Image (cartoon, helix red, strand yellow):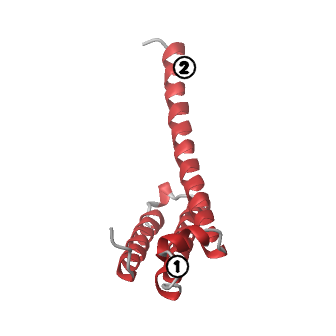
Amino acid sequence: ARPANSNDYCMLIGVHCCIFGATLYFILKAPVSRRVSRSLIAYVFSLFALGVIQVGTTIQFNMQSFIDDRGFPGGPFAYFQTFYSLPVNTLCNTGYVIAALLADAALVCTGAVLKLKQLMIKLHNAVVPS
């Protein structure tokens, strides 16, 4: 496998920005009767910010390993193992973990709402016979 180059990361940032823009567009262009809360907009912005932090720090760490310290004994793999705890790599991993927790929390909330609606329908059917 070849190492990722800067074109791959530029494409990743471009896709990330397009998805963020489309999401924000559809949230803000919702009909007045279906306006969403500001917390959803803040949620989308936070996921976007964490994604940009993660990609940016990944680019920086890979540039350090493949370009800046290309003469490291053992090559980039040895550099990854030796300097895994650099602050730039720690920031990358932290951004990923927080973004994953936020995304999982949204899935859990969605599942809880759907389960609650299903329970309400069952209770309604039990109370009001057809």
Q: Choose between 1 and 30: the one closer to the eye.
A: 1
Q: Is residue 35 left or right of residue 38?
A: left
- Classify the position of the N terminus by image quarter: bottom left
* Residue designated by label 2: 123
Asked if disc 1 and disc 2 are in contact, CB closer than 8 Å, the reply is no
- Residue type at tag 1: Pro
CA distance for labels 1 and 2: 67 Å
* Residue designated by label 1: 73
Whole-percent x, y for residue 85 in the image: 65, 69
At horizontal 52% and vertical 43% (from top left) the residue drawn is: 110
**On screen, 41 above or below 127?**
below
Task: Judge depth for marks 1 and 2 and give the one in front.
Answer: 1
Q: Choose between 47 and 118: the one closer to the eye.
A: 47
Q: Residue 5 falls in which quadrant of the image? A: bottom left
Q: Is residue 55 left or right of residue 85?
A: left
Q: Choose between 118 and 92: the one closer to the eye.
A: 92
**Extreme-bottom residue of the structure:** 68
Q: Secondary structure at mark 1?
A: loop
At horizontal 48% and vertical 55% (from top left) the residue drawn is: 34
**On screen, 129 above or below 20?**
above
Of mark 1 and mark 2, the one earlier in the sequence is 1
**On screen, 15 above or below 39?**
below
Q: How many marks?
A: 2
At horizontal 50% and vertical 36% (from top left) the residue drawn is: 114
At horizontal 54% and vertical 20% (from top left) the residue drawn is: 123
Q: Residue 109 falls in which quadrant of the image? A: top right
Q: Residues within 10 Å of mark 1 (few under 14, many from 20)?
A: few
Q: Secondary structure at mark 2?
A: helix
Q: Residues within 10 Å of mark 2 (few under 14, many from 20)?
A: few
Whole-percent x, y for residue 93 in the image: 59, 64
